[in-house]
Amino acid sequence: MSTLAPAADLESNPRVKAVFDDIRATRQTEFINNMWRYLAFDAGLLEQTWAEVKAVMATPSEIDPLTKEMLYIAVSIANNCGYCVHSHTAAARAKGMGEGQYAELLKIVALAAKTNHLATALQVPVDACFDAGAPGA
């Protein structure tokens, strides 16, 4: 259940239309998913968020597109964002993620959650060799 309803004709706002057109061009699809439709209640927030997503997720970089999507899934699981888990799992599958990779990703996420909780509960001190700011590191 959402906290607001998107306007009936979102693209009547030229700023929203420009972002939606850029999403369509960048993703090479006519589909505008609900995240963008709901963010369109505030054109400035929509513009800023799309610019950030485009810069990180749609711009070639040191990390390949499938790995970016898998990282996004992992963080979305950790943050309990069902919407992002679903949308980025679909995106990862579209970029070639197989069932074996997905299973391995979930194993890694589960293991990291477990060891994070244990390290937090035990308040394990960081080893000096892991501290990039430590003398001699």
Image (tube, helix red, strand yellow):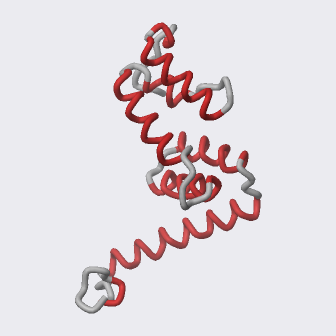
Q: Residue at x 54, y 27 (%)?
A: 22
Quick one: 103 or 92, which is closer to the camera? 92
Indicate the position of residue 40 as horizontal and vertical percent values: 43, 21
Vertical relation: 90 (above or below) 113: above
Quick one: 28 or 32, which is closer to the camera? 28
In the picture as drawn, the residue positioned furthest to the left comes out as: 135
Quick one: 38 or 132, which is closer to the camera? 132
Please indicate whether residue 90 sits to the left or right of residue 121 in the image: right
Q: Residue at x 41, y 28 (%)?
A: 46
- How many callouts does the rendering have? 0
Indicate the position of residue 3 as horizontal and vertical percent values: 40, 25
Please indicate whether residue 96 sits to the left or right of residue 114 in the image: right
Q: Residue at x 76, y 57 (%)?
A: 98
Q: Residue at x 71, y 63 (%)?
A: 101
Q: Quadrant of the C terminus?
A: bottom left
Vertical relation: 11 (above or below) 94: above
Indicate the position of residue 32 as horizontal and vertical percent values: 59, 25
